[in-house]
Amino acid sequence: MSEAPSRCDLIFRGATVFDGSGAEPVTADVAVENRRIAAIGDLGGSGAVVEIDAAGQALAPGFIDVHTHDDRYLLAQPDVPAKASQGVTTVVVGNCGISVAPLTRPGLPPPPFDLLADRPEFCFASAGDYFKRLDEQPAALNSLTLIGHSVLRYNCMDDLDRPATDAEIGAMRDLMADAMDAGAIGMSSGLFYPPAKAARTEEVMGAAEALTAGDGIYTAHIRNEADGIVDSIEEAAAIGRHADVQVVISHHKCMGTANYGRTRETLPLLDRLAGEQRIGLDVYPYIAGSTVLLPEMVEMAEKTLITWSKPRPDCAGRDLAEVAAELGLSPLEAAAELQPAGAVYFTMDEADVRRIIAYPRSMIGSDGLPSDNHPHPRLWGTFPRVLGHYARELGVLTMADAVHRMTGLPATEFGLGDRGFIRPGYHADLVLFDPGSVRDRSTFEAPTRPAAGIALVLVNGEAVWRDGASTGARPGRAIRRQETARGR
Ligand code: ZN
Ligand code: CU
């Protein structure tokens, strides 16, 4: 319990408070004053401008989506409805090796960059320019910014199909150091993707050296999430050790039927590595992934659904096998006809997904693709799906633990400082939801239906989502590394 001012901005009365630590909830009042949490406890002696009867409702720290591709979405749709509707209050942008800054060379990097932007005017010459734009045109949600290694490569190399020279690695390091000074939280890589495939481990290590001084974070869409899963996790870990930085294995999974069940190897491996270095992971709650349309993914997947296609927009939402039959082509030939395009791939085992969600150090990240015509349902459903389906319905983890994996845990891993917990003095990023009915409503057929059970979402003390709609408020901050625990 703590002292509340006699009259504050807002009080939630009698909420079931999940404080973000993973502890079981307590019934309490929570007061908000001047954009921060002022007090928690029995605040019967205090009044507020706005009083909310929260009896029977859960109050939690706003969810932190640690794995997003919302770089441009924050500017293009500043209400960020796909995320605000889930109770998300902070997004980490720039994952999987791609970010909208810095772009110093004319033209655009090759796919999967088109997941983010298909025109140069959506890109920024420096991370500083990107931050400036977010300050001038704030979004509803807070953001943290990673810089993509594949984009660094594109800036510094004339040919992406070979390893970088020492001089080119030095140039990437300098660009990354600039971005760190401007406020980037770290670097992501996507060694799985064609523009970065030719990069040697030493190249990423060299670029990651720019993270060391500012204690940046390194997130990795690893080289191979199928047969090469173990070696690829080891490679990302080695890059982290080289630069002495925290590693996050992105959207952990074991792809392809031959690799089903291999979380029995990878999770003990992550335990062992965590004994030696700072390493974590994120996961989304689905057995299908999504990215650009790639032949090797079509070959691996049990089923492929088209999410967008430039020449055939009418194919978005359709099964590739069906389109292929209609065209009288093989699935791979049909895929070639649809390019450039994106797809959802069913490549995972449900038991692995559950094992990763149950694993205590897994953070939740959506990996949603907001530009897709018919996106993977994770874009609108990830957080309520973990709370409703995996916690309440299946009991894979407790509700308190589920909240922890989307609040206190990511805030701690990313060194966010005073967010991610309900504590006096912390920023008032809060979500009020019904623990008995919260659930995802987005499906592979209807992927953009907002979740059920999310009553109210506050970012820095201001309501951004209420009763099923955006409020139009834009209180989000483009958080710089220097303001976080990493910058102190
Ligand atoms: Zn990825
Ligand atoms: Cu991603």
Image (cartoon, rainbow, N blue to C red):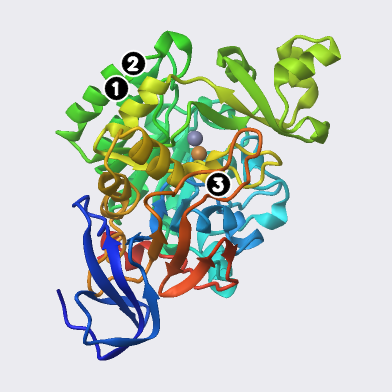
Mark 3 highlights which residue? 380
Mark 2 highlights which residue? 262
Mark 1 highlights which residue? 266
Q: Quadrant of the N terminus?
A: bottom left
Q: Name, please, the residue furthest toward the bottom.
A: 6
How far apart are the alpha carbons under marks 2 and 1?
A: 6 Å
- Identity of the amino acid at label 2? Arg
Q: Mark 2 touching mark 1, by CB under 8 A?
A: yes
The quarter of the displayed image where residue 209 is located: top left
Q: Residue at x 37, y 36 (%)?
A: 393
Mark 2 and mark 3 lie on one chain; the one further toward the N terminus is 2
Q: Residue at x 42, y 34 (%)?
A: 251
In this rendering, the answer to whether 86 lies above or below 130 is: above
Q: Give neighbour class at mark 3: few <14, some 14-19, many 20+ (Cα, 10 Å).
A: many
In this rendering, the answer to whether 184 lies above or below 361 is: below
Q: Can residue 415 be seen in the rendering of this structure?
A: yes
- Identity of the amino acid at label 1? Thr
Q: Residue at x 70, y 22 (%)?
A: 319
